[in-house]
Amino acid sequence: MGEREKQTLKRIIIIALSILLIAYIVYQAVQMISEPVETEIAYNYTVEDTVDTVVFVARQENYITNTKNGTIISIIPDGSRVGKNQPVAAVFSNTDDADKYNKLKELEESIERYERLASQSDNYTFDVDDLNDNIDRSVMDLADIINSGKMTLLSDAINELRDQVVTRQIAIGDTIDFESKLAAVKAEYDALSKQKVNYTPINSAQSGYYISGVDGLEQIVDCTKLSEITVDKVYEILKSEKKPVPNGSIGKVVTDFTWYFICNAHSNSIGDLKVGDSITVNLPFSSVNSINAKVYSINENNGDETALVLSCNLMNSAISSLRNESAELVIDSYSGLKIPASAIRVNEKGEKGVYVLKGNIVSFKKINIIYSSDNFVLSETDVGADGYVKLYDNIIISGKDLYDGKIVK
């Protein structure tokens, strides 16, 4: 290569290097000017510490028996409170009277339903999205009841779904003539109610909650000795087979208004749970969904497992059908503002917090951590002082050379 060619190549290399250097300087200048940041909105979030288990529902139950022949129909809903000697069911000597009675009850429910829906159509303000969610839940509840085989709850679930659908029709402006339907049902009811219906009442010998039907597990547990129950005893109860019931049993009365969940849990999973604490019991495969209870007793049988007894005094038709159930115990719950762990900084005062962006100004806000995990923490929602992260703040999760008061262009 000649001297001239060498000089030409040298100039080309110098020019290329100059271009690269200029490009790098421009890039750095742009980065310094634009200072892009990425933010995330602070929002409320709840974390639950849960324990999966299987519970047995124990109640102080006594059988209600009947010696008369005929068709037996409950005249009050399951889970209803009854007094001593109050009628809970009826014996019909012929099917015609039984059919008339059932029809009258259906017509009474229809009248109540149409009156309720008519009042909604006159005065209503509905959120269609909420109604859609309610319909979805009603469909899921109906599927759960069918899958669980608890057919005594089926009629109520179908009516609930039907009413939710009708309410949505009202909300979107559909015109439904409830008045004419109500008038027709009332006329049918008035005509049928004039016909004589003969039956013999079946009374409850004790006061309490009425439950139609029996399952042979009514006498498995002595509720007066639950404070002494052990892990081994809980397993024995969960494996119990149904026992023969007295002849003529048509239902039962729960004589103590407090009833119990019995279960075992791993000892290291129940944390600082103590007698008297309130606890939420989620029942994912039941139409009850969840229920609040109190810790009645905690009995350690060995180092690995603990026998738990939870008490409750709520009762309705769905709750009355519970017996052996898969459950999720909510041992503890934490609610606060969800903060990405990568966004947390420590200022010159040693205070933990995050940088937030308001308009184009960066500011440091403190956090009060009440729960932490590998990826995020929960900060107390309302600490009652200025300078802390608040709901809907724009938290900066990525950015360079951040400091309090910096202006982002």
Image: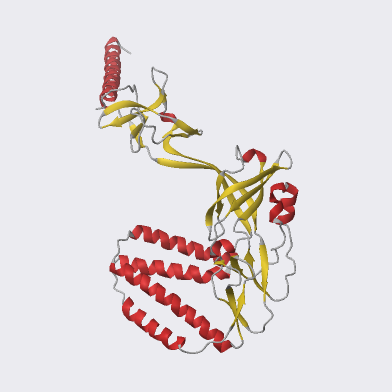
Residue depicted at x 72% and y 47%: 228
Closest to the observer, 35 or 214:
214
Residue 362, above or below 253: above
Closest to the observer, 348 or 102:
102
Q: Position of residue 170 (x, y in %)?
A: 32, 68
Residue 64 in view of the camera: yes
Closest to the observer, 140 or 192:
192
Residue 78, above or below 26: below
Q: Position of residue 332 (x, y in %)?
A: 54, 41
State which quadrant residue 208 falls in. Answer: bottom right
Q: Position of residue 296 (x, y in %)?
A: 63, 47
In the rendered image, the quadrant that contains the N terminus is top left
Q: Is residue 341 left or right of residue 313?
A: left
Q: Is residue 306 left or right of residue 6?
A: right
Residue 150, above or below 66: above
Q: Position of residue 219 (x, y in %)?
A: 72, 62
Q: Is residue 315 left or right of residue 35?
A: right
Q: How is the image coloured?
A: secondary structure
Residue depicted at x 60% and y 66%: 207
Residue 149 in view of the camera: no
Q: How many marks?
A: 0
Q: Residue furthest top?
A: 3
In the rendered image, the quadrant that contains the C terminus is top left
Residue depicted at x 25% and y 32%: 359
Closest to the observer, 8 or 337:
337
State which quadrant residue 82 falls in. Answer: bottom right
